[in-house]
Amino acid sequence: MSTSYDREREVALHAVRKAATLCQAVQSQIDPSVIEKEDRTPVTVADFGSQALICNALREAFPDDPIIAEEDSSALRKNQGVLLQVTQQVQQIRSGVTPNTVCSWIDKGNAGEYSDRFWTLDPIDGTKGFVRGDQYAIALALVVDGVPQVAALACPNLPADLDDDDAPTGQAFIAVRGDGAYQVSLNGEDDSGTRIHTSDAETPANGRFTDSFVSAHSAHDMAKETGQRLGITADPIRMDSQAKYAIVARGDAEIYFRLPRPGTNYTEKIWDHAAGMLVVEMAGGTVTDVNGDPLDFTHAPLLTENTGIVATNGHFHDQVLDALEMD
Ligand SMILES: Nc1ncnc2c1ncn2[C@@H]1O[C@H](COP(=O)(O)O)[C@@H](OP(=O)(O)O)[C@H]1O
Ligand SMILES: [Mg+2]
Ligand SMILES: [Mg+2]
Ligand SMILES: [Mg+2]
């Protein structure tokens, strides 16, 4: 029996659109008040505000669904000035909300561990890009029995056409397993959007690959050498956030490499990949780790069974894995 996820799709799209409005308002300010977390990574007013709005929207629509999200309110409760800023931003969309309620909405995202049906949320993916004024994403996915089924990926700074400087920016990517992937204007009223497909290139040669803007997040040298072995001559498209999955899904690049840096053993987080992976798969692409294994979401919040990520247009995935020459 197939399950319809129409309501989940609608709620997810609406929630990421509202969160994007908040993020755009914060990004237009000069100082987005960065806090450093205990792991020394940055978080901003917009990360917290986005998580509060989306968790509340999910709480209202699906009160029984756990949410595994990146942020929690502990750093915020210790910083009343920033909490006030977050509350003011959330009030632009949900008037009258108090700081305490904002914190409780954020912490609705702290389900922490795997269950048969849960949402996973990255309220801002690519916070470093967000702070720089570059690409970032708001990434929400519903995972059922360990498999992402619904994805809403908002990319507020992504142009409709990467090669056109005048193209309008602000896209959302929506995918439901078995039902294709769609690009929807972030700021418009149309919820259906346009179906997207990965590139139809049958060989990687002369294609393009994308990897992280931040060299600490993925081995740039290894990606470049692998690209050269595959006959790719174009410069990599270095970009923050799951916007990388989006550009593979709509055919602007053939490959996304996220390669572990030698000597490090970082474990990827589910919210950095669940939504993007589903968008690529439903656009015709393939996503595995560097060993060719499928991403395993049953160890949420971490992808403990996987090492690195490779996403391709789906036409030469094995060839790309072979070229990686991982030992
Ligand atoms: N050493 C590391 N290796 C790989 N990914 C890392 C990392 N340190 C942090 N990250 C993750 O990389 C994400 C950003 O990816 P990208 O470089 O593709 O934009 C971050 O998401 P957040 O920005 O949501 O914290 C964070 O979860
Ligand atoms: Mg982070
Ligand atoms: Mg992230
Ligand atoms: Mg984040």
Image (cartoon, rainbow, N blue to C red):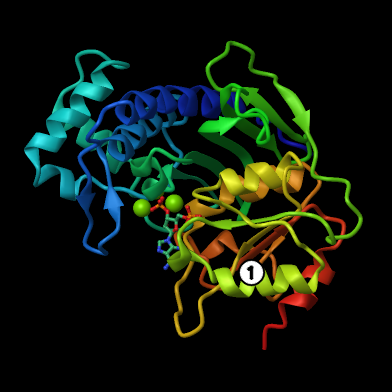
Rendered position, 213 above or below 220: above
Across and down, in percent, residue 316 comes to: 86, 62
Quarter-wise, where is residue 258 in the image? Answer: bottom right
Give residue 160's position: percent from left, percent from top: 65, 28
Q: Which residue is mark 1?
A: 223
Return the x and y of residue 173 as percentages of the image width and height: 63, 33
**What type is the residue that disc 1 sits on?**
Ala
Q: Residue at left 64%, top 63%? A: 257
Residue found at x 31% / y 33%:
52
Q: Along the horizontal axis of the image, is 96 left or right of 67?
A: left
Quarter holding the C terminus? bottom right
Q: Nearer the viewer, residue 88 or 204?
A: 204
**Residue 143 visible, this orientation:** no
| Along the viewing direction, whichever of 39 and 238 lies nearer the viewer | 238
Q: How many marks?
A: 1
In this rendering, the answer to whether 250 lies above or below 89 is below
